[in-house]
Image (cartoon, rainbow, N blue to C red):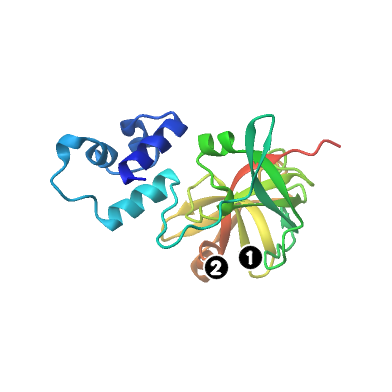
Amino acid sequence: MRFEQAIRDRLEQLGMKPFAAEQAYNLPPDTLRNILNPRNKNGAGPKLAKISEVCEALGIEISFGPPRSVEPTTELNGERFATIARYEASAAAGHGVVNLDAPPKDHLAVPRDWLIETGLRPDRCILITAKGDSMAPAISDGDLVMIDRHRTEITSGKLYVYNAPEDGTRVKRLELLPGTAIIARSDNPDQKRYPPEYHTGPAMNAISQNILGEVVWSGHLWK
């Protein structure tokens, strides 16, 4: 398949026009339009670096060599589902450790259309269980949490799972003050039990370098 057609197919899946996709995925202006517009052809296709940038942004897999196996899927009533690995591990809304070296306990079937709409790739995501109530009501004890392990750059205000040297693996809402500090916040309104945590210097680097991924979905367990 030609690169241009792969982009067109992906934009159709996302239900987006090139301009909207450039803005949504932080691509430089006219990146997609220059590739797709035949009037801009000069005999040379886009460079590999540009191809890689576009594929990374749109969630298009790029590979060289013999065909690889297709990601695990299942079908029910005509709808296709991808499978996300679920690990027998706990992420902490307080304390705990996630061991991703162990094999997954099982897999959860997720509609592929939903993954496409949200820009998620199943091969980059894992599922774990939250422990503790520091992130309630957003995430409660026992909730199933999906992590995109490709999203490790901190965007202030979003939830991340990260390894803390002294506290194990944690789920916190992170705020980045570039070059100054990382603030780990709990959603629980009881700020006496869960006050904001300010990390500077080596502690700041320890968090930023050990982020497992961004929390992109959670399923609430009703008790």
In the image, what residue type sits under mark 2?
A: Ala
Q: Which amino acid does label 1 sit on?
A: Ala
- The residue wearing badge 2 is 206
Picture quarter with the N terminus: top left
Nearest to the observer: residue 61 or residue 50? 61
Res 129 visible: yes
Q: Nearer the viewer, residue 63 or 59?
A: 63
- Quadrant in which residue 41 is drawn: top left
Query: Looking at the image, is 21 positioned above or below residue 105?
Result: above
Of residue 6 and residue 142, the one placed in the foreground of this image is 6
Residue 214 visible in the shown view: no
Residue 183 at x, y percent in the picture: 55, 54
The residue at 25%/41% (across/down) is 35
Looking at the rendered image, the quarter that the C terminus falls into is top right
Contact, CB < 8 Å: mark 1 with mark 2?
Answer: yes
Q: Which residue: 35% across, 43% down? A: 26
In space, the residues marked 1 and 2 are separated at their CA atoms by 7 Å
Q: Label 2: few (<14), some or many (≥20) within 10 Å?
A: some
Classify residue 137 by image quadrant. Answer: top right
Which of the 4 quarters of the picture holds residue 220?
A: top right
x then y, percent, for residue 18: 32, 33
First in sequence: mark 1 vs mark 2? 1
Residue drawn at the location 40% of the way across and 36% of the way down: 9
* Residue indicated by mark 1: 164
